[in-house]
Image (tube, rainbow, N blue to C red):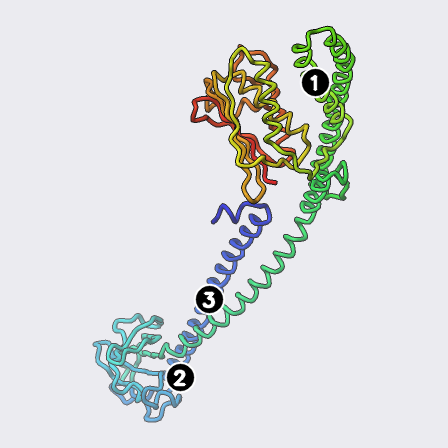
């Protein structure tokens, strides 16, 4: 899944931006949540401290010990289960006073609290199962007889309203961060679309070059791509010049062969009829090849035809001619075909491909060559040519398709026949594969998706 998401540059940038945005919004939400919670608890602390100061101001001295008035300054201390509770204890942990609101609750102030020190914490009331904020304050009170006594003032506040407020804030925070996240994702998508527009323009220019609509990159690219496009144009220009040199060389070579072939055709007239017929047929084939190569050299782009070319008759003709060339080997050949098979392209290209493969098969075979033609209903074409020779090692099956590479260095040849065959097949969006035949030799497979 991750590999699919990161398969393109835009997907990588979008995925990385999404992860970064998710982490950023998550961290922002966590920080805001902690800050809001700390702010609430600080407000609670300040409020409870003010309540303690209010209780201290209401204290009455009754001689031996202090006392609280019947009516307290904050009415919530007077209402049972109001959520705000107060109590006073002595230094020997004796409960001196408790607000009416804390009736029925087991709330006892801390003891041995340092004088003038506040202690803020959370606690719980087990009987009522209440979570509370608590603030304790230690004092020393001198009565009228100048006797000092230590007391602890305690205030408790129910946490439930604070928890509800915190939950409300978190819900609002999620909604806002979610909305901001969607907005930022939209902005990021727009930025990515705009930022990657030059790359899409480059891809479109390359596609037009592939289709032959233009011969170089013409778009106005940003500075980051300008160096690349300049080098690509230079590379393409050099490649065209080199291809033109190859085309000129091929044309010169093919043109130079025209005269020797004409002379040889004249000389065949003086030979016996049986030999002259075979030589004349091969000369005709050579003349067709020269004409074909001259046409290819003079045509800048390959033009495909939609005309169906029967495969089986061409196979029969090539096998018959090659069996005469290699008559000393007495090779037996057979064609297995439920249909004649149709190749949608130039007949000369088909003859070039099959001729190269069959020539290799005759050289390598011992006694048998088998050709199979298959064409399902979807018009895809498969041609399989097998022999009973020594075969081609697996590690050499890919290398042999490279120009100048031959599986058998002892035989004649330049090692370009199969490379030419593969190039022609690729030009028709087909493929050439080499496998091992059940007969022990090589199996050449031509496959075209018509």
Measured as percent of width and height from the top left, residue 261 is found at: 74, 13
Element under label 3? helix
Q: Nearer the viewer, residue 172 or 236?
A: 236
Element under label 1? helix
What distance separates the C-alpha of mark 1 from that of mark 2?
Answer: 118 Å
Mark 2 or mark 1, which is nearer the start of the sequence? 2
Question: Of all residues shown, which one is farthest toward the bottom?
Answer: 70
Q: Are marks 1 and 3 in contact (CB under 8 Å)?
A: no
Q: Nearer the viewer, residue 201 or 194?
A: 201
Position of residue 35 relative to residue 329, above or below, is below
Name the residue beneath numbered marker 1. Answer: 286
Element under label 2? helix
The answer to which quarter of the image holds residue 354 is top right
Q: Residue at x 47, y 23 (%)?
A: 395
Mark 3 or mark 1, which is nearer the start of the sequence? 3
Name the residue beneath numbered marker 3. Answer: 33
Question: Of all residues shown, which one is farthest toward the front?
Answer: 273
Name the residue beneath numbered marker 2. Answer: 54
Measured as percent of width and height from the top left, residue 118 is found at: 36, 72
Q: Residue at x 54, y 41 (%)?
A: 376
Q: Residue at x 26, y 79 (%)?
A: 107
Measured as percent of width and height from the top left, residue 353 is found at: 62, 26
């Amino acid at each position: 899944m991750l590999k699919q998401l990161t398969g393109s540059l835009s997907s990588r940038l979008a995925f990385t931006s999404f992860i970064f945005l998710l982490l950023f919004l998550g961290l922002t939400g966590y920080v805001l949540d902690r800050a809001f919670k700390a702010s609430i608890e600080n407000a609670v602390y300040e409020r409870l401290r003010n309540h303690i100061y209010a209780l201290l101001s209401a204290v009455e001295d009754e001689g031996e010990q202090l006392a609280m008035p019947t009516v307290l300054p904050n009415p919530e201390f007077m209402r049972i289960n109001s959520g705000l509770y107060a109590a006073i204890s002595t230094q020997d942990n004796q409960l001196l006073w408790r607000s009416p609101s804390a009736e029925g609750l087991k709330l006892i102030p801390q003891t041995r609290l340092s004088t003038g020190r506040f202690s803020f914490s959370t606690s719980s009331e087990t009987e009522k199962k209440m979570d509370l904020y608590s603030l304790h304050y230690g004092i020393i009170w001198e009565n009228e007889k100048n006797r000092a006594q230590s007391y602890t003032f305690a205030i408790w506040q129910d946490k439930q309203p604070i928890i509800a407020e915190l939950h409300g804030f978190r819900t609002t925070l999620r909604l806002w961060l979610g909305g901001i996240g969607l907005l930022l994702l939209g902005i990021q998508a727009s930025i990515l679309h705009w930022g990657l527009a030059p790359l899409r323009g480059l891809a479109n220019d390359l596609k037009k070059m592939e289709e032959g609509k233009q011969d170089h990159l013409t778009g106005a690219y940003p500075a980051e791509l300008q160096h690349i496009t300049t080098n690509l144009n230079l590379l393409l220009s050099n490649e065209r010049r080199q291809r033109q040199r190859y085309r000129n060389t091929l044309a010169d070579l093919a043109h130079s062969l025209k005269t020797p072939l004409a002379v040889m055709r004249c000389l065949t007239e003086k030979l016996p009829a049986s030999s002259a017929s075979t030589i004349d047929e091969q000369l005709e084939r050579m003349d067709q090849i020269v004409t074909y190569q001259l046409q290819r050299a003079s045509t800048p782009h390959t033009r495909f035809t939609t005309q169906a070319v029967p495969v089986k008759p061409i196979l029969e003709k090539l096998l018959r001619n090659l069996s005469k060339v290699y008559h000393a080997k007495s090779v037996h050949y057979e064609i297995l075909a439920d249909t004649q098979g149709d190749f949608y392209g130039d007949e000369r290209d088909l003859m070039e491909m099959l001729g190269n493969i069959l020539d290799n098969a005759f050289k390598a075979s011992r006694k048998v060559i088998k050709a199979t033609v298959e064409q399902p209903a979807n018009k895809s074409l498969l041609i399989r040519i097998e022999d009973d020779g020594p075969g081609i090692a697996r590690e050499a099956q890919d290398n042999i398709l490279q120009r100048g590479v031959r599986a058998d260095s002892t035989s004649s040849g330049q090692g370009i026949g199969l490379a030419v065959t593969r190039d022609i097949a690729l030009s028709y969006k087909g493929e050439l594969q080499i496998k091992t035949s059940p007969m022990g030799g090589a199996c050449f497979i031509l496959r075209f998706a018509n």
